[in-house]
Image: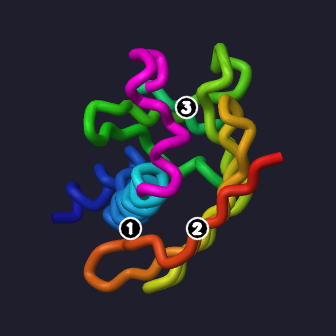
Amino acid sequence: MLFVIVFLSLFGISTAQESSTSEDQLILSSVLFQSDFKNYLHLDLNDERKKIFIVKSQITEELKGFERDGTQIMVASKSDITGKNYIEILEFKITQDLASIHFFYAIENVEVQAKLLKKGTWSVSDIRIIEP
C-alpha cells in the first residue's frame, strides 16, 4: 500500500486533480455546446472548425484536452496555435455547485460570460455572448 502511495506521489497522480480536471471539462463542454453559443462554432463549415484550441495559461493549467460530438478540444500554448480557432479563458471559477466562466473566442471575435449550476450535472443557468 505504501508503494502505491509513493508511486502516485512521484508521478503527480492525484484523484483530486483528476476530479478537478473532469469538472473543468464538463463545465467547458456545457458552455461550448449550449445552444446559444454552439452556433458560433460553425462546426458544419469544415474540419478545421472541429479542432478548437484552448490557450494554455495559469487558469487552464489543470485542463486536459477532450472530445465531444466529434469535436476535439485541445490545450496548447498560444505560440503553438496557428489560425484563430482558439479560446482564451479569462476567468474560470468553480465552487461546489456554482461555476462561472468568461472567455474570448478569437475566430468569431466574441466574448462569452456564463454561469452554471450543478444539480447532478452542470447546466448553464445564464449566458451572455458579447459581440463588438
Residue for badge 3: 53
What amino acid type should be assigned to the residue bearing mark 3? Answer: Phe
Q: Identify the element where label 1 is drawn.
A: helix
What amino acid type should be assigned to the residue bearing mark 2? Answer: Ile
Which residue is drawn at the image coordinates 38% and 26% (left, top)? 44
Q: Main secondary structure of the magenta part?
A: helix
Give the mark toward the camera: 1 or 3.
Answer: 3
Whole-angstrom CA distance, mark 2 to mark 3, is: 21 Å
Which residue is drawn at the image coordinates 67% and 23% (left, top)? 84
Q: Identify the element where label 2 is drawn.
A: strand
Q: Which residues are magenta?
A: 35-49
Which residue is drawn at the image coordinates 29% and 74% (left, top)? 121
Pointers 2 and 1 in contact (C-beta within 8 Å)? no
Which residue is drawn at the image coordinates 40% and 51% (left, top)? 33
Q: Is residue 34 left or right of residue 4?
A: right
State the quadrant of the N terminus.
Answer: bottom left
Residue 37's x, y, as percent?
52, 51
- Residue 109: quarter of image: top right
The residue closer to the viewer here, 85 or 91, is 85
Residue for badge 2: 127
Whole-angstrom CA distance, mark 1 to mark 3, is: 25 Å
Q: Is residue 115 above or below residue 88?
A: below
Mark 1 burial class by Cα count in 10 Å: few <14, some 14-19, many 20+: few
Tell which circle, 2 or 1, labels the residue nearer the N-terminal end. 1
- Residue 107: quarter of image: top right
Tell which circle, 2 or 3, labels the residue nearer the N-terminal end. 3
- Residue 114: quarter of image: bottom right
What amino acid type should be assigned to the residue bearing mark 1? Answer: Ala
Whole-angstrom CA distance, mark 2 to mark 1, is: 28 Å
Residue for badge 1: 16
